Image (cartoon, rainbow, N blue to C red):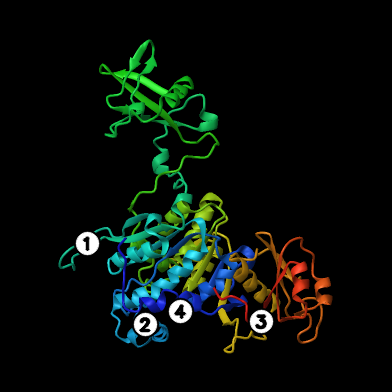
Amino acid sequence: MPTLNWIGKEAVVNHHQQVPFRLLKDVPDLACGDPGSGNLIVQGDNLEALKALLPYYAGQVKCIYIDPPYNTGNEGWAYNDNVNSPVIRDWLGKTVGKEGETLDRHDRWLCMMYPRLALLKQFLTEDGVILMSLDGNEHRYAELLMDEIFGSSNRIETFIWKKSYGGGAKSKQVVNLHEYVLCFARNKERVGTIELPPSDDVKKYYKFEDDKLETRGPYRLQPLATNSMDSRPNLRYAIPFEGQEIWPEKQWQWSRDRVLAALANNELVIKQVKGKWSVNYKQYLRDGDGEERGSKLYSIVESIYTQQGTNELKAMFGDGKTFDFPKPPELVKKFVQAFTAKDSIVLDSFAGSGTTGHALFKANEEDGGHRRFILVEMEPKIAREVTAERVRRVAQGYTSAKSEAVAGLGGGFRFCELGEPLFDETGMIRETVNFSELARHVYFSETGEPLPRARVLKTPFLGACRGVGIYLLYNGILGDESANGGNVLTRQILAKLPEFDGPKVVYCAGCLLSRDRLQAAHITVRQTPYEIKVL
């Protein structure tokens, strides 16, 4: 398989493993509605933010949509579209070293994206997908990068988004009307049928009715014969009808058993037209479970334009320059509806103007879903005044630039900033870290899975994973108020631990039990902080 190499690659391939875990600090004044709704906006560098979020969301995100910098060299945008920004230069200097000073734009972009994509992969469910918007500047490199991180066998599609109506008067050569959206799965074999909700454009074709109207709805006719050139002898057979045998010119789409069952069920329409037999099957609007038939997702996305995104922000903020070239919510909504269930989590780590949050609320409003979002935005001013403010207005309603009242779609979110690292410069746990914060990190580092959010952390027993009980002794969780009370595993402390019938892993500051005693109790001791893994 072709591979991609660039200056600085060796320094960043495993860099996500060295990123320190930071704590999340709530900013209640910037929250909206019910902070417990499951939606979250995080302000901070997305590499560190993703690492901070892993103990909470690893393996739980169904769909990731990102719109990273296109690396056009344009430094005049509100959100710098050039990876030569001061933040990236500083990061490259620390991560890549002196080589970072001489990298060209493509090297810098790849160095910036690799560790972020490596972390994003860990958030996806087994059947989850990631979508990345790009233009021609990095598209050819990005596909190889995604091949390497997600595997070429997990590529679903490169969507072509027709972003513009036309024009191009200023173009000296080719009028560019499109961008790309790369789509890869965590495990393509686990991704099922991809369908969009039924659209009114498609529903109008379902205009016939029969005795199944109440359960299956109206139907439309679809030809049973196919012009496929594949040689499928089992699909070439005669259909018995009114004492005659009807043969296809080439072959049928369905097997003989399926056709005969449909014929017996009055689900075929057979008639003679100009001396030739016509065989059509009834395609009902609803399936056997009563669910309306979805529409197909095409590789070329049309009738959704960049200008629509700009107009939405202009109507909301009264200024078309609030954020240049935001993606239209309809584009993101289309992908959200195609790749998620109604209770899925969607993540956008390049949140920008908050289009993904807007799109999610729209999708939920249309189909009654309860999808939740995680948005990460690096720039403080944008995160507070654009990302969070836009999502707030969509949720609660606002007065448009034309003084028209726009009803809210409902919903809320927490707003967080990145706090201090979990560990200090000497590798010790910071004194300000509370039990709940450390517990989530310990459970994730031990099991690779997030601690269930609903779990109340008021006991040293954090839970069981794959038959192993996980315990944490920290900050007097057993009621001892002394500075290090209860953090050392002794016979007395062991007797107080909640029982678990199986092997146990106990994180503690020290252990005074003998090896034989530990073996008899099936306990593995991990000393904090030295044996807490940093993934």
Amino acid identity at mark 1: Gly
Q: Is residue 322 found left or right of 482 in the rendered image?
A: left
Asked if residue 21 lies left or right of residue 102, the reply is right
Q: Amino acid at mark 2?
A: Ser
Instruction: Please tell me whether mark 1 or mark 4 is closer to you in this view.
Output: 4
Of labels 1 and 4, earlier in sequence is: 1
Mark closest to the chain's N terminus, 2 or 3: 2
Residue position for label 4? 379
Q: Amino acid at mark 4?
A: Glu
**Is 368 or 278 nearer to us in this picture?**
278
Residue on which the image places disc 2 = 85
Q: Closest to the observer: 52 or 410? A: 52
Residue 433's disc is 3
- Which residue is under mark 1? 167
Q: Is residue 136 above or below residue 369?
A: below
Q: CA distance from mark 2 to mark 3?
A: 33 Å
Marker disc for residue 395? none
Q: Amino acid at mark 3?
A: Val
Front in this rendered view, residue 134 or 503: 503
| Identity of the residue furthest to the top in this view | 243
- Residue 465 image-quadrant placement: bottom right
